[in-house]
Image (spheres, grey):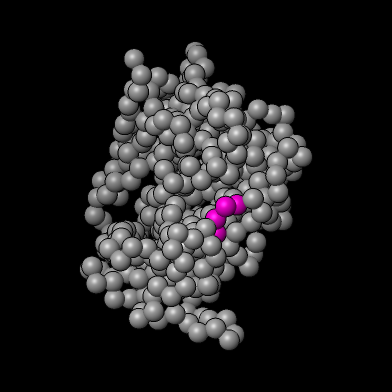
């Protein structure tokens, strides 16, 4: 896996000619190399990783891009990877040296000549301009959004549907977003009880997740797609070790303690004059009813308190819940008025084949608002260095 995560930009293998702008579409094979499942991820404020899938392996995945429709620049890689039972190859190209807060157009190898897409780079650290961002948890193929795993066979009564078909459906529908722990294996969150023996080769140990995505770990000293950060925010995730609380039998991906050391170093490096807000996002919360992850709290909460993390975002539970700032199970008496503890929010209400979960009642003393009757997502507005607001955008699908 390590070799697959290395970006080999501007290099050609021995005996092979590097692609050029004039032969951008070299090696295209019709439907076999037609791009699908297109998505991209921030790589700092000056970089972007463009990813897409093809039915055949690409010799040199390439991207043309520019600040106008002429797409006068090109970059390529040698990263076209697959795994057993996958029906496609995942192609990844890293673009560096971009201008922050700038719109670019791009086209990927073997796309239609007029098939152009756009992205906008991240705001540079210290830029005081207000901006908004969205947070969505637990999304996938069910309406409006939902998770893809083995359990959908029962929910949809689709008979011969396979896990890979379900994942491909998800990736086709949501090309520009990503997902998480339900890709640990073919039955995570499904019918259970889970053992490796029920999965086909290539459908365990986050294999699809590790091949399909390229998060900004190289730029932030993180690990593969599991933990990473970028200048306008911070993300962390904690996949279970074998025998962990999620029964995922995944990993280990690094020696014990590696993620904690990375997080401590990353938080300590933040210049709070340039980056006054620190936002951490993970999957499994530790202040929500039966999903409380005690080991997560033990591992991470001391660091969040030590380095003054402002907001902690989670999914996993399929509803919306907003907490008051809280530390060590004690609500901050200052509430949202310059609190000393992180402000916790859970929004896993994007959709799941089982529908929305129910919030436990009576509420805990730190729960301010809970919504378990509509699907929705969270919109954050960073107004300035002292104020952030959050809105829950909900939509009821059925009477």
Q: Residue at x 29, y 43 (%)?
A: 381
Q: Position of residue 328 (x, y in %)?
A: 56, 33
Location of residue 359 in the rendering, given as x and y in whole percent from the top left corner: 49, 19
| Residue at image location 53% in from the left, 72% down from the top | 59
| Residue at 39% in and 75% down | 24
Residue 149 image offset from top left, x and y in percent: 58, 36
| Region of the chain picked out in magenta, as a range | 86-90
- The outermost residue toward the front is 30
Quadrant (top left/top right/bottom left/bottom right) for the N terminus: bottom right
Observer able to see residue 346: no
Residue 82 falls in which quadrant of the image? bottom right
Whether residue 224 is situated above or below residue 197 in the rendered picture: below
- Confirm whether the magenta stretch covers residue 390: no
Q: Nearer the viewer, residue 282 or 166?
A: 166
In this rendered view, identify the residue nearer to me: 380 or 139: 139
As displayed, is residue 190 above or below residue 308? above
Does residue 178 appear in the picture of this structure? yes
Q: Quadrant of the C terminus?
A: top left
Q: Is residue 395 above or below residue 117?
A: above
Residue located at (27% from left, 49% from top): 131
Q: From this viewpoint, which residue is outermost toward the top?
A: 362
Determine the image quadrant of residue 97. Answer: bottom left
Query: Viewer-proximal residue, 85 or 105?
Result: 85
Main SS of the magenta segment?
A: loop
């Amino acid at each position: 896996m390590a070799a697959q995560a290395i970006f080999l930009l501007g290099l050609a293998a021995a005996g092979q000619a590097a692609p050029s702008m004039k032969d951008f579409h070299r090696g295209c094979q019709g439907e076999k190399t037609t791009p699908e499942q297109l998505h991209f991820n921030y790589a700092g404020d000056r970089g972007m990783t463009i990813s897409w899938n093809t039915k055949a392996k690409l010799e040199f995945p390439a991207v043309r891009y520019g600040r106008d429709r002429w797409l006068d620049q090109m970059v390529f890689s040698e990263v076209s990877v697959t795994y057993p039972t996958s029906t496609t190859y995942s192609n990844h190209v890293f673009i560096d040296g971009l201008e922050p807060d700038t719109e670019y157009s791009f086209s990927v190898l073997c796309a239609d000549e007029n098939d152009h897409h756009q992205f906008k780079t991240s705001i540079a650290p210290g830029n005081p301009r207000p901006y908004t961002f969205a947070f969505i948890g637990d999304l996938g193929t069910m309406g409006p959004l939902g998770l893809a795993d083995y359990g959908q066979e029962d929910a949809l009564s689709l008979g011969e549907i396979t896990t890979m078909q379900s994942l491909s459906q998800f990736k086709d529908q949501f090309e520009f977003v990503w997902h998480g722990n339900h890709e640990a294996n073919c039955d995570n969150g499904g019918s259970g009880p889970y053992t490796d023996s029920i999965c086909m080769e290539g459908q365990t140990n986050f294999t699809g997740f590790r091949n399909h995505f390229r998060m900004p770990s190289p730029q932030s000293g993180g690990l593969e797609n599991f933990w990473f950060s970028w200048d306008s925010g911070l993300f962390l995730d904690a996949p279970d070790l074998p025998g962990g609380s999620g029964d995922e039998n995944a990993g280990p991906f690094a020696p014990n303690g590696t993620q904690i050391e990375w997080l401590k170093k990353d938080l300590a490096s933040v210049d709070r004059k340039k980056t006054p807000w620190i936002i951490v996002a993970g999957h499994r919360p530790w202040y929500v009813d039966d999903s409380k992850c005690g080991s997560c709290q033990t591992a991470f909460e001391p660091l969040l308190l030590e380095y003054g993390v402002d907001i902690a975002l989670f999914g996993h539970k399929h509803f919306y819940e907003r907490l008051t700032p809280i530390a060590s199970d004690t609500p901050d008496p200052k509430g949202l008025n310059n609190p000393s503890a992180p402000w916790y929010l859970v929004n896993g209400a994007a959709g799941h084949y089982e529908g929305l979960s129910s919030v436990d009642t009576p509420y805990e003393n730190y729960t301010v608002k809970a919504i378990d009757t509509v699907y929705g997502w969270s919109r954050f507005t960073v107004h300035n260095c002292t104020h952030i607001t959050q809105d829950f955008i909900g939509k009821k699908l059925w009477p």
